[in-house]
Image: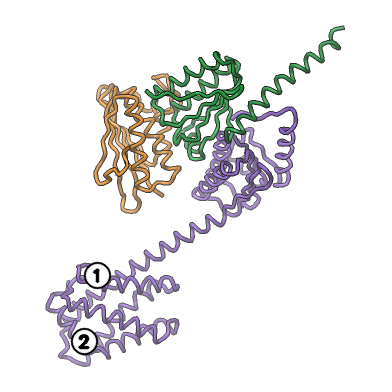
Chain colours: A orange, B purple, C green
């Protein structure tokens, strides 16, 4: 288990298999609990992380996830970066539309994950990989 | 301009040698401001406490309130402003309790020219200003935490979930629903469904004066979430103006059951459960 | 890879998911269940997700698929025990779990399936009663 995780620095997890997606979920949950997110907010951020980590694996061909405890001076929070060096996303607006999918899923991964967090930033270009940063603040 | 170590020493000397005059004048100024809301004895005790902490800190060579020598003084200041914030004193009154020290110092230095120069007075003033600002900050922090506590208590008070019948719970919503409160209501209602194993919930909005898009969305989401969990929600007590707003905003209530009153909603549920206990059971899909 | 156990209780298959499933485990469960429905001839499937602290779109899709497959195999699927936080998150995610029947707990899920079977038999009785009067 990942209990007793060191919050002072970001925790990294490589994503190369199904089991790694499970590990990402567990890591995110541990940090979300440590920064005192409410139960519903923990559930939301872990779900968002699960969607995005699966995207990293399926569409990005694997990559890394970095989970960090953050503080904006008023509230603590959790920030997660998903990075891959896969094919990137050509039409970002389309990819963020509900129901759009290229991988046979429900097409809710990107758009759904964005609704579950407070901040969502995506940097991508064809052939340049994808880097998504999400943040959820404690209330 | 900050206090030099030299000036710090002189201020300590001045406060010690003229202790009676200083505390006397200090107490007078504060008493005039508070007009009897704090007893003389309490006030005197508070001023003496501050005086003692200040002299102690200066004795250790305090030149800046934020420095380590100021730890105890800061604690005393925080304690005083916390007390005043809780007793309902204004921020200005609380800060004046510290700024009055300037008055006291001025009268002492005027009476005894050898006690210090104008330059000393300005330097002392800087420290008193720091103390005043610190008091103000502690005051605001205390008030903020008071407000947060009260808001939380209000949420607890205003969102009861009651059991109406075997398998039927109800939330009578009263007052304005904002996003935060709607969220609390939603979570509490859903948790009660699990805890009591109730497949029916009635959300009564008779006491809600207005519904905007956001609140309507929250209610709709609650209903959908309850369905995902295997329970049905009925909304009752929709007032005419609210019905008009809902239609005007174009909010789709879809196939969600709405009833005029809580009584109608309960009758509706009992009829459903009555059918359920009979031969032919039917339940909607999630 | 871990496999989720499937229990047979009377005419019902009970699946209680107790682990944080990897996607492979979820797919395997889907396959195992289809086989067990056919092998046992059960008419009801209860999937208990009380222990799941999240349901993402993959697991949501698996639940939908299981429901559809079992319907084809003449078995009714009921998902029970979804936590409030999970339900709220699913609504926000935009996943409606169309076609899946839900109940608060295993007991209610069993009642739901039993009631369904009863209704089906009733309809059968009704139609056989009605036939003689209709034919002449």
Image point 57% across, 39% down: which residue? B220
Classed neighbour count for the residue bearing mark 1: other residues with Cα under 10 Å, few (<14), some (14–19), many (≥20): few
Q: Which residue is mark 1?
A: B71
Image point 59% across, 52% down: which residue? B160
Q: Quadrant of the N terminus of chain A?
A: top left
Q: Position of residue B263 (x, y in %)?
A: 73, 46
Is label 1 in a helix, a strand or a loop? helix
Q: Position of residue A25 (x, y in %)?
A: 36, 34
Against A62, residue B45 (above or below) is below
Residue nearest the observer in this picture, C105 or B268: C105
Residue nearest the observer in this picture, A90 or B55: B55
The Cα–Cα distance between marks 2 and 1, rounded to whole angstroms, is: 20 Å
Q: Which residue is mark 2?
A: B16
The single residue placed furthest to the top in the displayed view is: C136
Image point 56% across, 16% down: which residue? C40
Residue nearest the observer in this picture, A114 or A15: A15
Is label 2 in a helix, a strand or a loop? helix
Against C98, residue B30 (above or below) is below
Q: Quadrant of residue C58?
A: top left
Classed neighbour count for the residue bearing mark 2: other residues with Cα under 10 Å, few (<14), some (14–19), many (≥20): some
The single residue placed furthest to the left in the displayed view is: B6
Against A65, residue C130 (above or below) is above
Image point 55% across, 50% down: which residue? B177
Q: Position of residue B175 (x, y in %)?
A: 59, 54
Disc with the residue nearer the chain's start (2 vs 1):
2
Q: Quadrant of residue B5?
A: bottom left
Q: Position of residue B87 (x, y in %)?
A: 44, 73
């Amino acid at each position: 288990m990942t209990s007793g995780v060191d919050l002072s620095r970001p925790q990294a997890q490589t994503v190369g298999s199904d089991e790694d997606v499970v590990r990402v979920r567990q890591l995110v949950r541990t940090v979300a609990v440590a920064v005192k997110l409410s139960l519903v907010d923990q559930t939301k951020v872990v779900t968002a992380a699960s969607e995005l980590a699966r995207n990293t694996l399926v569409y990005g061909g694997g990559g890394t996830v970095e989970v960090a405890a953050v503080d904006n001076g008023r509230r603590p929070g959790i920030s997660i970066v998903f990075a891959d060096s896969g094919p990137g996303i050509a039409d970002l607006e389309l990819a963020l539309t509900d129901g759009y999918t290229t991988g046979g899923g429900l097409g809710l991964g990107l758009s759904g994950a964005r609704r579950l967090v407070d901040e969502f930033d995506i940097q991508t270009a064809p052939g340049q990989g994808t880097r998504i940063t999400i943040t959820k603040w404690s209330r | 301009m900050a206090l030099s170590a030299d000036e710090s020493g002189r201020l300590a000397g001045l406060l010690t040698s003229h202790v009676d005059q200083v505390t006397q004048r200090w107490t007078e100024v504060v008493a005039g401001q508070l007009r009897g809301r704090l007893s003389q004895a309490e006030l005197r005790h508070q001023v003496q406490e501050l005086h003692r902490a200040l002299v102690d800190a200066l004795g250790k060579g305090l030149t800046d309130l934020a420095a380590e020598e100021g730890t105890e003084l800061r604690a005393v200041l925080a304690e005083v402003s916390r007390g005043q914030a809780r007793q309902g004193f204004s921020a200005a009154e609380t800060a004046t309790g510290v700024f009055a020290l300037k008055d006291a110092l001025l009268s002492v230095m005027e009476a005894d020219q050898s006690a210090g120069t104008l330059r000393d007075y300005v330097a002392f003033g800087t420290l008193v200003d720091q103390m005043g600002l610190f008091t103000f900050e502690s005051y605001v922090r205390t008030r903020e935490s008071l407000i947060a506590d009260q808001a939380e208590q209000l949420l607890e008070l205003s969102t009861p979930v009651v059991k109406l019948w075997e398998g039927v719970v109800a939330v009578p919503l009263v007052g304005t629903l904002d996003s935060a409160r709607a969220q609390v209501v939603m979570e509490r209602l859903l948790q009660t469904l699990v805890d009591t194993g109730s497949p029916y919930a009635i959300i009564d909005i008779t006491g809600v004066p207005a519904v905007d898009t956001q609140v309507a969305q929250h209610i709709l989401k609650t209903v959908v979430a309850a369905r995902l969990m295997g329970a049905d929600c009925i909304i009752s007590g929709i007032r005419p103006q609210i019905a008009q707003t809902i239609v005007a905003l174009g909010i789709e209530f879809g196939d969600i059951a709405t009833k005029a009153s809580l009584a109608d909603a309960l009758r509706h549920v009992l009829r459903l459960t009555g059918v359920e206990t009979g031969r032919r059971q039917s339940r909607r899909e999630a | 890879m871990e496999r989720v156990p499937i229990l047979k209780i009377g005419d019902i298959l009970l699946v209680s998911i107790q682990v944080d499933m990897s996607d492979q485990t979820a797919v395997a469960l889907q396959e195992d269940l289809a086989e067990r429905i056919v092998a046992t001839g059960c008419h009801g499937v209860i999937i208990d997700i009380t222990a799941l602290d999240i349901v993402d779109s993959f697991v949501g899709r698996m639940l939908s698929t299981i429901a559809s497959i079992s319907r084809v195999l003449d078995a009714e699927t009921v998902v029970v025990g979804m936590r409030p936080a999970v339900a709220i998150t699913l609504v926000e995610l935009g996943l409606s779990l169309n076609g899946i029947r839900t109940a608060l707990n295993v007991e209610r899920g069993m009642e739901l399936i039993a009631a369904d079977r009863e209704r089906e038999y009733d309809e059968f009785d009704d139609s056989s009663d009605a036939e003689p009067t209709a034919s002449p």
